[in-house]
Amino acid sequence: MPDHGLVHRFQAHERRRREPVGGIVTGLHRLACDYVIGELGPEALPSIAAEALARGVDSLALRELAGCNASDDVRDIRDLYLAAMAELEIPMPDADSVLWEKVRLWARCMVEATVSPYEGASQIERYGVALGSPQEIGDIPYLMALWAEYPARRRELEISMVEEARSLLPRPEEAG
């Protein structure tokens, strides 16, 4: 059964775009990022392919992919997806690069206070684990462990989490 939440996410992302086909290709690239880190499974790909076709993106492999169903072999679906992306000249991103992008996204959300420090730190820790728990993640895992152990110190821990998140972002002079 297709994951309609991902299809709706793709549709919503595309409605925000001005250029019809260019925006869809951008959406497909973002979904490719989710695919390479395992956040988008092969079962969702046929529905996404059908939606892309309906919006004017076309390739032979994309048509074949749109015709797949739940009983098809996931390896065949994966191969068709990779072929469609190649035909559309959408490069498949590097998983580690995508994971670091997600880490920085959550860090930025924490610093801008659009998510709670705990929620952001949880996501950073999750992506950090997928990266092999690099030192660059800093004290986020340690702070998460303290969060569970010392409820009375949570406000102090939140401040530390945001500071750790800030250290994951490029400095203004580096961002240019």
Image: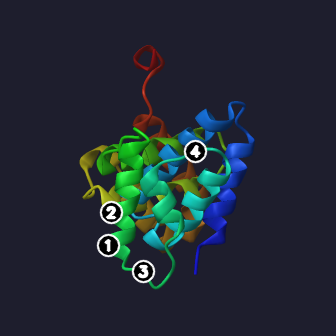
Q: How crowded is mark 1: few (under 14 residues within 10 Å), some or many (20 or more)?
A: few
Q: Report, in whole angstroms, how far the alpha carbon at label 2 lies from the one at label 1.
A: 6 Å
Question: In the rendered structure, which amino acid carries the disc numbered 2?
Answer: Asp
Proximity of marks 2 and 1: CB atoms separated by less than 8 Å: yes
Q: In which quarter of the image is the C terminus?
A: top left
Crowding at mark 2 (Cα within 10 Å: few <14, some 14-19, many 20+)? some
Label 2 near label 4: C-beta < 8 Å?
A: no
| Res 29 visible | yes
Marks 4 and 2 sit apart, C-alpha to C-alpha, by 18 Å
Task: Find residue 79 and name its label.
Answer: 2
Residue that carries the numbered disc 4 in the rendered image? 57
At numbered mark 1, what does the secondary structure look like: helix, strand or loop?
helix
Amino acid type at mark 4:
Val
Q: What residue is pinned by disc 3?
A: 72
* Mark 3, secondary structure of its residue: loop
| Mark 4 and mark 3: Cα distance apart in space | 23 Å
Residue at x 53%, y 64% (from the top left corner):
66
The residue sitting at 55% across, 39% down in the picture is: 26
Query: In the image, 68: left or right of 27?
Result: left
Q: Is residue 20 above or below residue 122?
A: above
Residue with the mark numbered 1: 75
Q: Residue furthest bottom?
A: 71
List x then y, in percent, for residue 59.
47, 48
- Is the residue marked by circle 4 packed among few (<14), some (14-19), or many (20+) residues within 10 Å? some
Circles 3 and 1: CB distance less than 8 Å? no
